[in-house]
Amino acid sequence: MEIPRKIGIGIVMIVPAFVFGGAVWSWFGSWTTVFIFEILMVLLYSSIISGWPVSAIQKT
């Protein structure tokens, strides 16, 4: 995957991170849960740009 595409995906992933981070804050009122959610978003972004689900399926 090219670098501009990775950056574009990262920029697009910022929107759900902000929206869902605010939703998590309103539901739970805890910065800890917001932080955990944001870490999950980073892991999701990392798996997308590394091609983890696709490369794992193609190897079998």
Image (cartoon, rainbow, N blue to C red):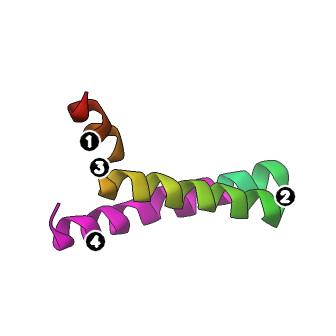
Q: Is residue 28 above or below residue 46?
A: above
Looking at marks 4 and 3 on the same chain, the residue that comes earlier in the sequence is marked by: 4
Q: Quadrant of the N terminus?
A: bottom left
Q: Position of residue 6 (x, y in %)?
A: 26, 66
Contact (CB < 8 A) between labels 3 and 1? Answer: yes
Q: Residue furthest right?
A: 29
Q: Which label number is shown at residue 51? A: 3
Reading the image, the residue beneath label 2 is 29
Q: Tell me the tag on residue 7.
A: 4
- Residue 50: image x %, image y %? 32, 56
- The answer to whether mark 1 and mark 4 are in CB contact below 8 A is no
User: Mark 2 vs mark 1: which is more N-terminal?
Assistant: 2
Element type where label 1 sits in the image: helix
Read off the magenta span.
Answer: 1-22
Q: Earlier in the sequence, mark 1 or mark 4?
A: 4
Q: Main secondary structure of the magenta part?
A: helix
Q: Residues within 10 Å of mark 2 (few under 14, many from 20)?
A: few
Residue 54, image quadrant? top left
Residue 18 drawn at (x, y percent): 55, 63
Q: Which residue is mark 1?
A: 55
Which dot, 1 or 4, sits closer to the camera? 1
**Mark 2 to mark 3: distance in Å?**
34 Å
Circle 2: element type: loop
Disc 1 packing (10 Å; few <14; some 14–19; many ≥20): few
The amino acid beneath tag 3 is Gly
Amino acid type for the residue under numbered disc 2: Gly
Find numbered disc 4 in the image and state the secondary structure of the residue it sits on: helix
Say which residue appears at 31% left-offset and 58% top-offset.
Answer: 49
